[in-house]
Image: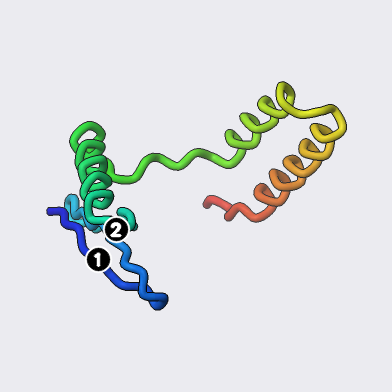
Amino acid sequence: MSRVYKISTRTGKTRWYVCVTYRGQRYREVGGDTKQAALKRLRELETRLEKTGKVVEKKVPFDFLCDEYLRWTQINLAPQTRRERVIAVWQAISMSVAWRPIKR
């Protein structure tokens, strides 16, 4: 079951939302500023649901994103900027490792 509906914001702007229910799970998101945009987004979600059986795409691990970014910096950034970004990324990785819950 799926539908589109509109809600007015505090500023008076109208937003169209998409609501999809699959196996008892409800998924909602902003579809756009017009009904046509929301219907297009609804068709995209229904197509993805038919192909994969999932509405939401799988999350990508943070470490993987950091590695991809560091590879991109090798090609696209100057050496000094690259060094600064590498330091920032490794600090972020060390913080994310420190805050991970312990699996028991």
Which residue shows up at 75% across the image and 40% down it?
A: 90
Mark 2 nearby-residue class (10 Å; few <14, some 14–19, many ≥20): few
Q: Nearer the viewer, residue 94 or 16?
A: 16
- Rendered image: mark on residue 28: 2
Seen as rendered, the residue at the extreme top is: 75
Q: Position of residue 6 (x, y in %)?
A: 24, 66
In the picture shown, does residue 15 fall above or below 50? below
Q: Nearer the viewer, residue 16 or 103?
A: 16
Of label 2 and label 1, which has the lower sequence position? Answer: 1
Dot 2 falls on a residue whose secondary structure is strand
Q: Position of residue 79 (x, y in %)?
A: 85, 27
Q: Position of residue 31 (x, y in %)?
A: 30, 54
The reply to whether the C-beta atoms of the residues labelled 2 and 1 are less than 8 Å apart is no
Seen as rendered, the residue at the extreme left is: 1
User: Quarter of the image holding residue 5?
Assistant: bottom left
Dot 1 falls on a residue whose secondary structure is strand
According to the picture, the residue beneath numbered tag 1 turns out to be 6
Q: What's the amino acid at mark 1?
A: Lys
Which residue shows up at 16% across the image and 57% down it?
A: 3
Which residue shows up at 41% across the image and 75% down it?
A: 11
Q: Position of residue 37 (x, y in %)?
A: 27, 49
